[in-house]
Image: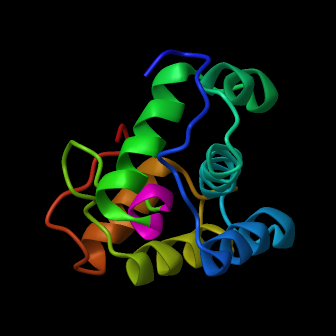
């Protein structure tokens, strides 16, 4: 499809349009999800790829990727995060929250504040991981 051609292949139902409107205007989603919702809303209204890129300050590959994800997998696939490559996080969400709480608490005796090395040691002490480097 040419870069400036209208996008008639993205047809949104009334329910999908309402869902996108809610995502865009309620402000409770991540910036990435809101941007994807804006892209889909504009695609559904027949805006050209170039118009969308200019209006939303996104790249053409981003618009094409969101359009493809919508046409192949539907609204939720187009809005959601795909798994990212790389190693899995060592901590789950609950463990990360506990470490954050510890980092916000009083530092151990002899220290002014929690350091990354101290937190890494604490992660191992709590049994969250067998090893943890402060370097990431």
The structure's colour scheme is: rainbow
For image coordinates 70% across by 30% down, the residue present is 52
In terms of depth relative to the viewer, which is nearer, 24 or 107?
A: 24
Residue 72, image x, y percentages:
29, 55
Residue 28 found in image quarter: bottom right
For image coordinates 61% across by 31% down, the residue present is 6
The segment highlighted magenta reads 75-79
The answer to whether residue 64 is left or right of residue 59 is left
The answer to whether residue 72 is left or right of residue 60 is left
Residue 62 vertical placement versus 38 (above, below): above
Is residue 99 part of the magenta span, yes or no? Answer: no
Q: How many marks?
A: 0
Residue 31, image x, y percentages:
69, 51
On-image quarter of the C terminus:
top left
Residue 35 vertical placement versus 122 (above, below): above
Residue 90 found in image quarter: bottom left
Residue 32 vertical placement versus 77 (above, below): above
For image coordinates 22% across by 43% down, the residue present is 85
For image coordinates 51% across by 51% down, the residue present is 10
Residue 3, image x, y percentages:
54, 16
């Amino acid at each position: 499809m040419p870069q400036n051609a209208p996008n008639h292949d993205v047809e949104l139902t009334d329910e999908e349009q309402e869902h996108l409107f809610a995502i865009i205007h309620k402000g409770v989603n991540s910036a990435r999800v809101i941007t994807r919702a804006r892209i889909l809303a504009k695609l559904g209204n027949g805006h050209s790829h170039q118009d969308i890129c200019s209006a939303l300050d996104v790249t053409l590959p981003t618009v094409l990727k969101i359009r493809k994800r919508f046409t192949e997998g539907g609204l939720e696939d187009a809005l959601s995060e795909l798994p990212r490559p790389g190693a899995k996080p060592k901590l789950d969400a609950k463990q990360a929250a506990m470490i954050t709480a510890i980092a916000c608490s009083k530092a151990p005796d002899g220290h002014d504040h929690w350091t990354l090395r101290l937190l890494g040691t604490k992660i191992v002490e709590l049994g969250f991981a067998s090893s943890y480097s402060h370097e990431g």
